[in-house]
Image: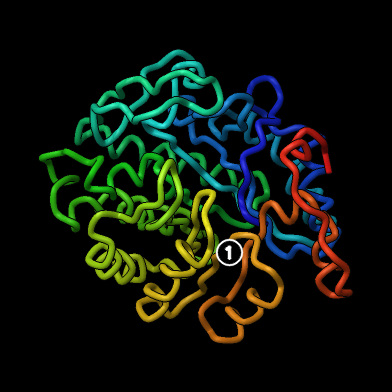
Amino acid sequence: MTAMTRSKAGPGHVATPQMAAYYARRAEEGVGLILTESTAVNALGDGFPDAPRLETAEQAASWRQVTDAVHGAGGRIFSQLLHCGRISHPDYTDGRQPVSSTGVAASGVNRRNGKSYPAPRMLSTGEIDDIIHQFLRAAAAALESGFDGIELHLAHGYLADQFLDGRINDRTDRYGGTVENRCRFALELVEAAIRECGAPHVMVRVSPSRWMGGLYDWPDLEPMLDYLIPSLDATGLRQLDISCARADYDETSGRVVRMVRPLWPHLLTAGASLQLAQAQAEVESGLLDMVTYGRFLIANPDLVDRFVSGRPLEPYDVTMLETLE
Protein backbone atom coordinates (compact mmCIF):
# COMPACT_ATOMS: atom_id res chain seq x y z
CA MET A 1 0.00 0.00 0.00
CA THR A 2 1.58 3.23 -1.14
CA ALA A 3 1.59 6.38 0.98
CA MET A 4 -1.48 8.59 0.51
CA THR A 5 -2.02 11.93 2.24
CA ARG A 6 -5.30 11.86 4.19
CA SER A 7 -5.34 14.89 6.55
CA LYS A 8 -6.99 12.83 9.30
CA ALA A 9 -4.60 13.42 12.20
CA GLY A 10 -5.96 14.55 15.54
CA PRO A 11 -5.27 17.79 17.44
CA GLY A 12 -1.55 18.20 17.96
CA HIS A 13 -0.84 16.27 14.74
CA VAL A 14 -1.14 12.90 16.46
CA ALA A 15 -2.25 9.56 15.08
CA THR A 16 -5.79 8.55 16.04
CA PRO A 17 -7.75 5.33 16.69
CA GLN A 18 -9.47 5.89 13.35
CA MET A 19 -6.10 5.87 11.60
CA ALA A 20 -5.19 2.65 13.39
CA ALA A 21 -8.42 1.02 12.21
CA TYR A 22 -7.87 2.26 8.65
CA TYR A 23 -4.39 0.76 8.35
CA ALA A 24 -5.26 -2.40 10.28
CA ARG A 25 -8.07 -3.22 7.89
CA ARG A 26 -5.68 -3.22 4.93
CA ALA A 27 -3.40 -5.59 6.81
CA GLU A 28 -6.35 -7.82 7.72
CA GLU A 29 -7.31 -7.97 4.04
CA GLY A 30 -3.85 -9.22 3.04
CA VAL A 31 -1.69 -6.17 2.27
CA GLY A 32 1.81 -7.28 3.18
CA LEU A 33 3.55 -3.91 3.49
CA ILE A 34 1.90 -0.57 4.26
CA LEU A 35 3.52 2.81 3.74
CA THR A 36 1.86 5.43 5.91
CA GLU A 37 0.65 8.82 4.79
CA SER A 38 3.38 11.45 4.64
CA THR A 39 4.47 12.31 8.17
CA ALA A 40 6.34 15.58 8.67
CA VAL A 41 9.61 15.39 10.57
CA ASN A 42 8.82 18.73 12.23
CA ALA A 43 6.45 21.71 12.00
CA LEU A 44 8.58 23.47 9.39
CA GLY A 45 8.44 20.40 7.18
CA ASP A 46 4.65 20.18 7.24
CA GLY A 47 2.56 21.15 4.25
CA PHE A 48 -0.97 19.86 4.81
CA PRO A 49 -3.92 20.52 7.12
CA ASP A 50 -4.38 17.97 9.90
CA ALA A 51 -1.30 16.01 8.85
CA PRO A 52 0.55 13.78 11.30
CA ARG A 53 4.02 14.63 12.52
CA LEU A 54 6.84 12.75 14.23
CA GLU A 55 8.54 15.44 16.25
CA THR A 56 7.28 15.35 19.86
CA ALA A 57 7.09 12.50 22.35
CA GLU A 58 3.29 12.71 22.24
CA GLN A 59 3.23 12.38 18.46
CA ALA A 60 5.61 9.42 18.55
CA ALA A 61 3.61 7.64 21.25
CA SER A 62 0.38 8.10 19.29
CA TRP A 63 1.68 5.92 16.46
CA ARG A 64 2.03 2.87 18.74
CA GLN A 65 -1.70 2.15 18.42
CA VAL A 66 -1.26 2.08 14.62
CA THR A 67 1.76 -0.22 14.55
CA ASP A 68 0.25 -2.55 17.15
CA ALA A 69 -2.98 -2.81 15.15
CA VAL A 70 -1.18 -3.52 11.89
CA HIS A 71 1.12 -6.11 13.46
CA GLY A 72 -1.85 -7.73 15.19
CA ALA A 73 -3.45 -8.12 11.77
CA GLY A 74 -0.33 -9.74 10.33
CA GLY A 75 1.02 -6.79 8.35
CA ARG A 76 4.17 -4.70 8.29
CA ILE A 77 4.28 -0.93 8.20
CA PHE A 78 6.84 1.74 7.32
CA SER A 79 6.54 5.42 8.28
CA GLN A 80 6.95 7.74 5.31
CA LEU A 81 8.97 10.73 6.54
CA LEU A 82 8.60 14.04 4.75
CA HIS A 83 9.83 17.62 4.62
CA CYS A 84 7.75 19.70 2.17
CA GLY A 85 10.22 22.55 1.79
CA ARG A 86 8.72 25.31 -0.34
CA ILE A 87 5.61 23.26 -1.25
CA SER A 88 3.95 24.54 1.88
CA HIS A 89 2.47 27.64 3.49
CA PRO A 90 2.70 29.29 6.92
CA ASP A 91 -0.85 28.01 7.50
CA TYR A 92 0.75 24.57 7.93
CA THR A 93 4.17 25.39 9.41
CA ASP A 94 2.91 26.99 12.63
CA GLY A 95 3.29 30.41 11.01
CA ARG A 96 6.93 30.03 9.96
CA GLN A 97 8.33 30.87 6.53
CA PRO A 98 8.96 27.66 4.54
CA VAL A 99 12.55 26.79 3.63
CA SER A 100 14.06 25.34 0.48
CA SER A 101 17.15 24.89 -1.65
CA THR A 102 16.15 28.20 -3.22
CA GLY A 103 14.59 31.52 -2.30
CA VAL A 104 12.20 31.39 -5.27
CA ALA A 105 8.54 30.61 -4.66
CA ALA A 106 6.85 27.66 -6.35
CA SER A 107 4.37 28.60 -9.05
CA GLY A 108 0.66 28.11 -8.62
CA VAL A 109 -1.37 27.82 -5.45
CA ASN A 110 -1.46 25.41 -2.56
CA ARG A 111 -4.23 22.98 -3.43
CA ARG A 112 -5.26 22.71 0.22
CA ASN A 113 -5.85 26.36 1.09
CA GLY A 114 -5.97 27.91 -2.37
CA LYS A 115 -3.25 30.45 -1.48
CA SER A 116 -0.15 31.25 -3.51
CA TYR A 117 3.04 29.60 -2.36
CA PRO A 118 5.17 32.16 -0.50
CA ALA A 119 8.80 32.78 -1.26
CA PRO A 120 10.80 30.35 0.89
CA ARG A 121 13.96 31.12 2.80
CA MET A 122 17.02 29.52 1.23
CA LEU A 123 18.66 27.15 3.69
CA SER A 124 22.22 28.02 4.60
CA THR A 125 24.87 25.39 4.04
CA GLY A 126 25.13 24.78 7.79
CA GLU A 127 21.39 24.35 8.22
CA ILE A 128 21.31 21.32 5.94
CA ASP A 129 22.93 19.21 8.66
CA ASP A 130 20.12 20.34 10.98
CA ILE A 131 17.51 19.08 8.50
CA ILE A 132 19.25 15.71 8.35
CA HIS A 133 19.27 15.48 12.14
CA GLN A 134 15.55 16.24 12.19
CA PHE A 135 14.95 13.32 9.84
CA LEU A 136 17.13 11.07 12.01
CA ARG A 137 15.26 12.05 15.17
CA ALA A 138 11.95 11.25 13.48
CA ALA A 139 13.33 7.97 12.14
CA ALA A 140 14.48 6.88 15.59
CA ALA A 141 11.09 7.83 17.04
CA ALA A 142 9.35 5.81 14.31
CA LEU A 143 11.29 2.65 15.14
CA GLU A 144 10.71 3.17 18.86
CA SER A 145 6.99 3.48 18.08
CA GLY A 146 6.96 0.04 16.50
CA PHE A 147 7.36 0.77 12.81
CA ASP A 148 9.18 -1.90 10.82
CA GLY A 149 11.05 0.78 8.93
CA ILE A 150 10.89 4.20 7.34
CA GLU A 151 10.55 5.52 3.82
CA LEU A 152 12.42 8.75 3.09
CA HIS A 153 10.22 10.83 0.79
CA LEU A 154 12.70 12.39 -1.62
CA ALA A 155 10.13 12.86 -4.38
CA HIS A 156 7.18 14.82 -5.79
CA GLY A 157 8.76 18.25 -5.69
CA TYR A 158 9.28 18.33 -1.92
CA LEU A 159 12.48 19.40 -0.16
CA ALA A 160 14.95 16.76 -1.37
CA ASP A 161 13.57 17.07 -4.90
CA GLN A 162 14.09 20.84 -4.66
CA PHE A 163 17.80 20.05 -4.38
CA LEU A 164 17.81 17.40 -7.12
CA ASP A 165 15.99 19.47 -9.75
CA GLY A 166 18.30 21.94 -11.51
CA ARG A 167 15.39 24.17 -12.50
CA ILE A 168 14.69 24.82 -8.82
CA ASN A 169 18.12 24.51 -7.20
CA ASP A 170 19.98 27.76 -7.89
CA ARG A 171 22.60 27.36 -5.16
CA THR A 172 26.27 28.18 -5.61
CA ASP A 173 27.57 26.15 -2.64
CA ARG A 174 28.43 22.44 -2.53
CA TYR A 175 24.72 21.54 -2.70
CA GLY A 176 24.07 23.22 -6.06
CA GLY A 177 25.24 23.36 -9.65
CA THR A 178 26.55 19.98 -10.82
CA VAL A 179 24.62 16.73 -10.73
CA GLU A 180 26.93 15.50 -7.97
CA ASN A 181 26.30 18.59 -5.85
CA ARG A 182 22.53 18.51 -6.35
CA CYS A 183 22.44 14.86 -5.25
CA ARG A 184 24.56 15.56 -2.15
CA PHE A 185 21.72 16.34 0.28
CA ALA A 186 19.72 13.25 -0.68
CA LEU A 187 22.75 10.98 -0.44
CA GLU A 188 23.91 12.40 2.90
CA LEU A 189 20.41 11.93 4.27
CA VAL A 190 20.12 8.33 3.07
CA GLU A 191 23.58 7.41 4.36
CA ALA A 192 22.80 8.91 7.78
CA ALA A 193 19.43 7.14 7.97
CA ILE A 194 21.02 3.78 7.21
CA ARG A 195 23.58 4.34 9.96
CA GLU A 196 20.75 5.23 12.34
CA CYS A 197 18.23 2.54 11.40
CA GLY A 198 20.05 -0.18 9.46
CA ALA A 199 19.57 -0.84 5.75
CA PRO A 200 16.69 -3.37 6.17
CA HIS A 201 14.64 -0.61 7.78
CA VAL A 202 15.13 2.13 5.17
CA MET A 203 13.33 2.64 1.86
CA VAL A 204 13.69 5.67 -0.42
CA ARG A 205 11.11 7.21 -2.74
CA VAL A 206 12.16 9.20 -5.80
CA SER A 207 10.11 10.57 -8.70
CA PRO A 208 12.35 11.50 -11.64
CA SER A 209 9.28 11.78 -13.88
CA ARG A 210 5.85 12.86 -12.68
CA TRP A 211 2.72 14.83 -13.37
CA MET A 212 2.68 18.00 -11.29
CA GLY A 213 0.96 20.71 -13.29
CA GLY A 214 2.58 19.23 -16.39
CA LEU A 215 4.41 16.08 -17.39
CA TYR A 216 8.11 16.61 -16.87
CA ASP A 217 11.37 14.86 -16.09
CA TRP A 218 14.36 16.01 -14.17
CA PRO A 219 16.05 18.31 -16.72
CA ASP A 220 19.13 16.08 -17.00
CA LEU A 221 17.30 12.82 -16.33
CA GLU A 222 19.81 10.28 -17.65
CA PRO A 223 22.96 11.84 -16.10
CA MET A 224 21.07 12.23 -12.81
CA LEU A 225 20.01 8.59 -12.76
CA ASP A 226 23.43 7.40 -13.90
CA TYR A 227 24.95 9.14 -10.88
CA LEU A 228 22.19 8.93 -8.26
CA ILE A 229 21.18 5.28 -8.52
CA PRO A 230 24.69 3.75 -8.17
CA SER A 231 25.40 6.29 -5.42
CA LEU A 232 22.30 5.15 -3.52
CA ASP A 233 23.58 1.59 -3.89
CA ALA A 234 26.93 2.67 -2.45
CA THR A 235 25.24 4.07 0.68
CA GLY A 236 24.00 0.56 1.47
CA LEU A 237 20.39 1.28 0.50
CA ARG A 238 18.57 -1.86 -0.63
CA GLN A 239 14.94 -0.72 -1.10
CA LEU A 240 13.95 1.83 -3.75
CA ASP A 241 10.46 3.13 -4.60
CA ILE A 242 9.96 4.78 -8.01
CA SER A 243 6.90 6.94 -7.65
CA CYS A 244 4.90 9.44 -9.65
CA ALA A 245 2.33 12.11 -8.85
CA ARG A 246 -1.07 11.74 -10.53
CA ALA A 247 0.44 10.28 -13.71
CA ASP A 248 0.14 7.40 -16.13
CA TYR A 249 2.49 4.55 -15.20
CA ASP A 250 3.76 3.91 -18.72
CA GLU A 251 4.63 7.58 -19.24
CA THR A 252 6.34 8.16 -15.90
CA SER A 253 7.22 5.52 -13.31
CA GLY A 254 7.18 2.59 -15.74
CA ARG A 255 9.48 4.39 -18.14
CA VAL A 256 11.90 5.31 -15.34
CA VAL A 257 11.81 1.75 -13.95
CA ARG A 258 13.21 0.56 -17.28
CA MET A 259 16.04 3.07 -16.97
CA VAL A 260 16.74 2.30 -13.32
CA ARG A 261 16.58 -1.51 -13.30
CA PRO A 262 19.92 -2.02 -15.12
CA LEU A 263 21.53 0.25 -12.50
CA TRP A 264 19.77 -1.20 -9.44
CA PRO A 265 20.14 -4.91 -8.50
CA HIS A 266 18.15 -4.66 -5.26
CA LEU A 267 14.48 -4.45 -4.29
CA LEU A 268 12.57 -2.14 -6.62
CA THR A 269 8.93 -1.17 -6.21
CA ALA A 270 6.65 1.05 -8.27
CA GLY A 271 3.07 1.28 -9.46
CA ALA A 272 0.11 3.52 -10.16
CA SER A 273 -3.11 1.52 -9.85
CA LEU A 274 -1.92 -1.10 -12.32
CA GLN A 275 -4.35 -3.73 -13.48
CA LEU A 276 -3.47 -7.19 -12.21
CA ALA A 277 -2.15 -8.52 -15.53
CA GLN A 278 0.22 -5.59 -16.02
CA ALA A 279 1.44 -5.75 -12.43
CA GLN A 280 2.10 -9.47 -12.74
CA ALA A 281 3.97 -8.91 -16.01
CA GLU A 282 6.22 -6.27 -14.41
CA VAL A 283 7.14 -8.69 -11.61
CA GLU A 284 7.56 -11.77 -13.79
CA SER A 285 9.81 -9.86 -16.20
CA GLY A 286 12.10 -8.90 -13.31
CA LEU A 287 11.48 -5.18 -13.71
CA LEU A 288 9.80 -4.92 -10.30
CA ASP A 289 9.94 -6.89 -7.07
CA MET A 290 6.80 -5.32 -5.55
CA VAL A 291 3.91 -3.31 -6.96
CA THR A 292 2.37 -0.46 -4.96
CA TYR A 293 -1.34 0.32 -4.88
CA GLY A 294 -3.08 3.48 -3.73
CA ARG A 295 -6.50 4.50 -5.02
CA PHE A 296 -7.46 0.89 -5.75
CA LEU A 297 -6.98 0.17 -2.04
CA ILE A 298 -9.10 3.16 -1.06
CA ALA A 299 -11.97 1.91 -3.19
CA ASN A 300 -11.33 -1.78 -2.49
CA PRO A 301 -10.02 -2.57 1.00
CA ASP A 302 -10.37 -6.24 -0.06
CA LEU A 303 -8.20 -5.69 -3.14
CA VAL A 304 -6.10 -8.79 -2.52
CA ASP A 305 -9.16 -11.04 -2.39
CA ARG A 306 -10.60 -9.42 -5.50
CA PHE A 307 -7.36 -10.07 -7.38
CA VAL A 308 -7.28 -13.69 -6.22
CA SER A 309 -10.95 -14.36 -6.96
CA GLY A 310 -11.16 -12.35 -10.16
CA ARG A 311 -14.02 -10.20 -8.90
CA PRO A 312 -14.29 -6.75 -10.56
CA LEU A 313 -12.90 -3.70 -8.77
CA GLU A 314 -15.02 -0.87 -7.45
CA PRO A 315 -14.15 2.46 -9.12
CA TYR A 316 -12.36 5.08 -7.07
CA ASP A 317 -14.24 8.22 -6.10
CA VAL A 318 -12.64 11.13 -4.24
CA THR A 319 -15.53 11.20 -1.74
CA MET A 320 -14.24 7.87 -0.43
CA LEU A 321 -11.47 9.82 1.31
CA GLU A 322 -14.07 11.20 3.69
CA THR A 323 -14.85 7.77 5.08
CA LEU A 324 -12.82 5.33 7.15
CA GLU A 325 -13.02 2.60 4.53
- Say if 278 sits above or below 20 in the image: below
Image x and y of residue 35, in percent:
63, 53
Q: Is residue 43 left or right of residue 20?
A: left
On screen, 126 above or below 150?
A: above
Residue at screen point 19% across, 45% down: 175
Kind of residue indicated by mark 1: Gly
Q: Horizontal placement of 110 versus 226: left or right?
A: right
Q: Position of residue 42 (x, y in %)?
A: 48, 30
Find residue 263 and report its image quarter: bottom left
Whether residue 277 sits left or right of residue 230 in the image: it is right
Which residue of the protein is positioned furthest toward the left in this rendering?
172
Q: Between residues 71 and 180, which one lies in front from this camera angle? A: 180
Q: Residue at x 68, y 56 (%)?
A: 34
Quarter-of-image position of residue 61:
top right
**Colour scheme of the picture:** rainbow
Indicate whether 145 appears above or below 217: above
For disc 1, the marked residue is 271
What percent of the width, then of the height, locates residue 87? 41, 32
Q: At which x and y percent is residue 125? A: 19, 36
The residue sitting at 22% across, 41% down in the picture is 169
Q: Secondary structure at mark 1?
A: loop
Residue neighbourhood size for the residue with mark 1, other residues' Cα within 10 Å, grouped as few (<14), some (14–19), many (≥20): many
Q: Quadrant of the N terminus?
A: bottom right
Q: Is residue 243 left or right of residue 323?
A: left
